[in-house]
Image: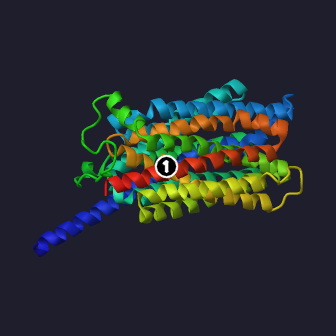
Amino acid sequence: MTAANAKALAATGSSLRLAQFRTIALLFVGYAACYYCRADLSVATPLLVEELGRRGVGHAEAVVHIGTITSLGVFAYAIGKLFLTGLGDYWGGRRNFLIGVGGATLFTLMFAASGTLPLFTLAWVANRLTQSVGWAGLIKVSSKWFDFSSYGTVVGILSISYLVGDALARQQMGMLIESGYGWRGLFVFAGLIAGMALLANLLFLRESRADEGHPEAKPNPLNLFAATEAAPASITALLVPLFRSRAFMLVCLLSFACTIIRETFNTWNPNYLHDLGFSMSRSATLSAIFPAVGAVSVLVAGWVSDKLGLGGRSLLMFTGLAATAAALTALSFVHPGSSATALPVLIIGVVAFCLLGPYSYLGGAFALDFGGKQASAASSGIIDGIGYLGGVLAGDSVARLAGALGWERVFLVLAAVSAVAAVCAGALHVLNLRAARINS
């Protein structure tokens, strides 16, 4: 190789790395902004409950109303994941991603302009439905920009986006509440953040590295579509290989169980902490512990999984979910109404660390492993969609259970869910080890 050729290759590699960094940054900022448009309802729940109380609605009834809105939104999100995200495998991930960020912007501002429960519900459902295609779009774009050997690290970094966005939103919204802003101010703030992220992605995000003259990204050679580089010929060709895979079905079950736990904490942390005795602004700020600690967990889990290989992900899931079950059991012994202490916040942090790192594999690295470049959007959408069908239970059902039996029983139920999920993760690990032996 001549010196000129070596210099040209080095320049090409440097140009690719710079473009990959730009892509990660745009996807990160865009998806983080979407979580401003999800955290707002959770943070504003105590404020909305107070406002409904001034209209003559009892506290418990108001909490159930908010829980119902939350459940309907999660259901819309699940439906979108199941039936809309696969479009990204045909028309490209960039379009899906822009729809997600754009819908978050538009319908969050619509919520801020609303004043009745039906309009709140309509705006929230539309917000979650359009956001449902965003993550699969991000995964599809990632499959076109990065080689399979870096999936764990890349998706780990991008998975922090929603945790960082969630944590920052809760911190900043807590400050807004402390400064005297009401619930409308929180939604306007979130909508403006999402609008700025939308503009940046419209201008600078590209579908794939091939669009800028770089070589195609290398997919996992063991993915279910490895025999061809062409787009699936039909919906049947897209879905049948996925649903025939026992490992894929186990990942879907894991997503169902883990999302119930995750969405319960995402939705009810501020309200739970307020019930413990913390002020509204302090509850909003402290609720950021869940996504903030989760961000550290995701980074660690992504890096470790790339070092351990494919079998390492399922092993880490088993370990993390077993530890999550233990932490949730401990949280069930903390009684709401007692003096506000650091203990429940500490345990919530432990749950976040044990759960969210392994959880990030499900609709991310696992989806890329199963779908490759051909079906990564559909794979991610199905895994997440089934998960969010479970997440529907985190709204209305958790509100009713907490009202009837208390938060202690809620956490015991979640501990049981986590224990069952740990068993599923163990079964997935066995399947992965067998597949590795067969293909070695």
Secondary structure state at the residue bearing disc 1: helix
Give coordinates of residue 232: x percent, y percent.
29, 34
Point out the image quarter for the N terminus: bottom left
Task: Answer with left or right where residue 316 lies relative to residue 264.
Answer: left
161 or 361: nearer the eye?
Answer: 361
What residue did someone put label 1 on? 428
Number of other residues with Cα within 10 Å of mark 1, as a class: few under 14, some 14 to 19, many 20 or more? many
Q: Is residue 393 left or right of residue 163?
A: right
Q: Residue at x 10, y 73 (%)?
A: 2
Residue at the (50%, 32%) spot, across then down: 80
Q: How is the image coloured?
A: rainbow
Residue 66 pos. (x, y %): 73, 34
Which quadrant of the structure image shows residue 388?
top right
Residue 246 lies, in percent from the top left, at: 44, 41
Q: Quadrant location of the C terminus?
A: bottom left
Q: Residue furthest right?
A: 338
Farthest top residue in view: 118
Name the residue: 68% across, 44% down.
Answer: 264
Residue 253 appears in the rendering: yes
Above or below 405: residue 31: below
Q: Outermost residue toward the left? A: 2
Is residue 171 something that shows in the picture? no
Q: Position of residue 381 (x, y in %)?
A: 46, 38
Which amino acid type is marked by label 1?
Leu
In the rendered view, does 181 fall on the left or right side of 356? Answer: right
Q: Nearer the viewer, residue 361 or 166?
A: 361
Q: In the image shown, does 73 or 285 lie closer to the viewer? A: 73
